[in-house]
Image (spheres, rainbow, N blue to C red):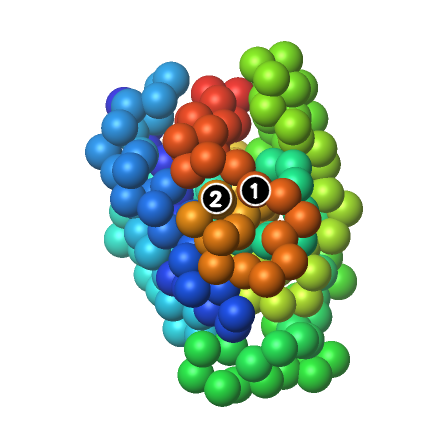
């Protein structure tokens, strides 16, 4: 059985609930297609989240990695096309703020997702879930984690370069939307979890 490392994040900034945390907890241990899901929740701390995802990757030796993050301003499930070598934006949960900083001084400008993002979007749409490819993961932690895992796979000689990895942003859940002042729209937690199950099936 292949192993899939699935990560989510804890709540951050003005979002008291992070539906990605609930999704990964729900899917822990499930078998989806060829993959057994191994879930981990990451802190919203630039340095810690990067170190932890690399550590989990090294410990678990997965065959694929999907990191999930909340993009509460979006209404679609959005597999990300690219991670860029830049950290910027709001402070993390420990008050660390980055401005125009490279993630890796020596690293390339960007990494494309190696997940089948078009197949994921097509399958989700066929099954009635709004989804589209996103061409920017932003410059906050989600982009950082996506860049870090792709850079690790690409540059470490021990790692199988065929390992698929990437990032999917998801919209707000209803319970988060109730607590936000201006949610553009939200999904039930069940639909979010089912949509991620389908995205994994597209692997
Ligand atoms: N979303 C943030 C960080 C944590 C999360 O769930 C992001 O999009 O960068």
In the rendered structure, find residue 8 and report the number of the disc placed on it.
Answer: none
Q: Position of residue 157 (x, y in %)?
A: 47, 53
Residue at left offset 62%, top offset 53%? 183
Any atom of ligand 1 within 8 Å of the CB at mark 1? no
Please give the name of the residue rendered at 46% of the width and 29% of the height, measured from the top-left corner.
Answer: 191
- Look at the numbered disc 2 and give the secondary structure of its residue: helix
**Is residue 140 or residue 110 the one in the foreground?**
140
Q: Which residue is mark 2?
A: 174
Relative to residue 40, is residue 38 depicted above or below? above
On the picture, is 35 further left or further right than 131? left
Q: At which x and y percent is residue 5? A: 37, 42
From mark 1 to mark 2, how far is it between C-alphas? 5 Å
- Counting from the top left corner in percent of width and height, residue 197 is at 43, 26
Which residue is denoted by mark 1 in the rendering?
Answer: 186
* Mark before the other along the chain sequence, 1 or 2: 2
Q: Tell me the residue at 35%/22% (across/down).
A: 32
Residue depicted at 71% across the width and 33% down the height: 132
Can residue 93 be seen in this snapshot? yes
Are the two marked residues, 1 and 2, in contact with CB atoms closer than 8 angstroms? Answer: yes
């Amino acid at each position: 059985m292949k192993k899939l490392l699935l990560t989510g994040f804890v709540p951050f900034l003005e979002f008291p609930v992070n539906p990605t945390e609930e999704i990964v907890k729900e899917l822990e241990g499930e078998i989806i297609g060829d993959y057994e899901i191994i879930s981990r929740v990451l802190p919203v701390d630039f340095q810690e989240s990067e170190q932890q995802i690399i550590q989990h990757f090294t410990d678990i030796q997965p065959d694929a990695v999907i990191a999930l993050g909340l993009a509460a301003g979006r209404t679609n499930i959005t597999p990300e096309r690219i991670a860029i070598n830049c950290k910027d934006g709001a402070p993390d949960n420990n008050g660390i703020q980055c401005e125009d900083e490279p993630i890796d001084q020596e690293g390339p400008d960007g990494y494309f997702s190696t997940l089948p993002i078009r197949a994921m979007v097509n399958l989700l749409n066929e099954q009635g879930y709004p989804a589209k490819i996103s061409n920017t993961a932003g410059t906050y932690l989600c982009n950082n984690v996506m860049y870090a895992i792709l850079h690790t796979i690409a540059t470490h000689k021990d790692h199988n370069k065929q390992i698929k990895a990437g990032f999917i942003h998801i919209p707000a859940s209803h319970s988060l939307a109730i607590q936000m002042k201006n949610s553009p729209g939200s999904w039930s937690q069940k639909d979010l979890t089912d949509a991620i199950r389908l995205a994994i099936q597209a692997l």
